[in-house]
Image (spheres, helix red, strand yellow):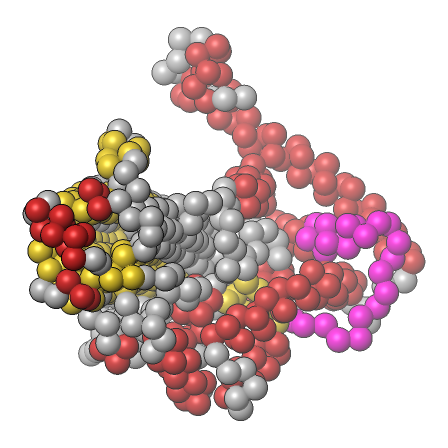
Amino acid sequence: MTYRELTATEIAQLEQQGNYADDWSKVKVTDPFSIACLRNNNFEGAVCIGVVESRKNSVGDLTLREGIYNSTLSDSCIGDHPTVHNVGMMSGYTLGDNVVVFNVEEMTCCGEPRRAVWIEPMNENGGRKILPFSGMTIGDAYLWARYRGRKRFMQKLEQFTYDLLGTAEGAYGHIGDGCIIKNTKTVHNVSVRSTAADPTRIDGCIVLSDGVVGYGCTVEYGVIAVRFLLGEHVHLEYGLRLNDTVVGDNSTLARCEVGNSIIFPAHEQHHNNSFLIAGLVMGQSNIAAGGTIGSNHNSRTADNELAAGRGFWPGLCCSFKHPSRFASYCLIAKADYPAELDIQLPFALVNNNAKEDRLEVMPAFWWMYNMYALDRNSKKFAKRDKRTVKAQNIEFDNLAPDTAEEMLHGMDLLRGWMAASTDGTVYADGMEKGKRKTVVLKAAEGLKAYEEMLVYYAMKCLSANGDKMPAAQAKVETEWVNIGGQLVARGDMEGLITDVENGEIKDWNGLNARLNDLWRQYPAQREAHAYHVLCRLAGAEELDEQQWGGYRARYEEIKEYVARQIKASRQKDEVSPYRRMTYWDDEEMAAVMGS
């Protein structure tokens, strides 16, 4: 933008309108400049102001006049068409165009990259600390926090960040175009990203300090967030307390305490008395009310963590010992779990049977008993993704290479445990710390269900290209890592890290460009993996026409089974007298519940 100094006539009129400046030569403006739109302000240090015109701006129920009124601005740069009213102090900020800041007590930024505040996710002892910046993805944060053993990689990521923060934009707090911040107590060292397509709104007695708010976010109704990174379209509301945490895209957190955690996209945690501390939750997850999921320092230091795969769903009032680990799509029954857990069976129901004093795990529970929820979850996350800026790549399907590999591992475990059974009861090893027994419920049914799920996954991938048998694949990735929601083959991940360490990838832009390249390769890799899954199930290096034809026929049968089970599991709610008893008739129930 092109700025000019004020004329003597303009300065005199501004002073008549109640404005004051330490040094009017440091206050610069852009034409067209409506001088009547600046009243009762204090200007300290260098202040640049974009185009200001005499017009009104509707913000919800408010109608505010464009301009700057009753505010103190220090060392800040204001974009075109600002609406800034009643700001006690704004210092060290750049504002984009069409920004509204109304009734904010304090909005300050230190402006010193080397004084930027680190956040400590996943662990309360600070051993996984990262330095957030505007534009950081959830995958970026996870890479930095997770790969701590690669010291050269850590040094490079830190240098990437200081190089970025050392730019003119990085030295200031930043409020993006179209953002609305109103009725807020404190915004300190915060970058807020916003566009007309993905507007961000902050409203209602908010305290934000040392963090980044992504595009399309809503922060409202008494939230306190300190040392944080929010992805795109995150909702924080209703008295949430958040610290040292990364929250993934399309997530909602409310009425609870969340600290020292990394949460991948599509997470829901919005009921009273829930807390999540020192956790890694890989998204598409839901934390029910009353959950006490926090590090309770079983060892002598604050170094315990909980790691949960995609689809983690602990029931009401669940309590866990840290450290614990859960495979993807574990549904945890309401209980106080007395010891550390390592649940290696995906899509499982986990139950603490206090009467029998044993842990119970039912593999493939979702497939056998709640197909409607499994199908709905696979669709709803993609449907709810309203991002126009999709910096973080996300796999939404619950049947994907990561969960397929977990099921194959689960099948091996089940076969071994079943073979060792002598009395018809299947006992599992290594899923709970301690001496009491772990019983696998419906082990044979779960083994069969995993096979069906794998055929369904593989054929769904391969059938997208028609009925022709695919060619055998010479190289197939069997190990996958979830990088903030994006599935990456482990070999590709190692290559990325090596290229950062040796300087071939030179900055965060280069790192994310590599991840985007891998995302473009992912559909082909997934198809190759799907073919390899069928080969492993068939016990063959490659499929022949007879085997392929058999899997095609099996796929049609499984699709019919899926359709029947979706209807049957949903119909339980439709026909249950207990679900219907609060409605007078079918018409009322349909109006409230939908079809």
Q: Position of residue 210 (x, y in %)?
A: 24, 65
Along the viewing direction, whichever of 371 and 277 lies nearer the viewer: 277
Q: Is residue 396 above or below residue 526?
A: above
| Farthest-out residue, right | 545
Residue at image coords 39%, 13%: 583
Q: What's the residue at 48%, 26% (across, down)?
A: 573
For the point 63% across and 69% down, which residue is it?
Answer: 517
344 on left or right of 418: left
Which residue range is magenta in the image? 455-479
User: On the image, which quarter does residue 21 sit in?
Assistant: bottom left
- Residue in view at x 20 percent, y 42 percent: 36
| Residue 206 image point, x, y percent | 19, 49
Residue reaching furthest to the front:
9
Where does the N terminus fall, quadrant-wise?
A: bottom left
Q: Quadrant of the C terminus?
A: top right
> Which residue is nearer to you in this view: 298 or 118?
118
Viewer can see residue 576: yes
Q: Determine whether, in the image, residue 515 is placed left or right of residue 249.
A: right
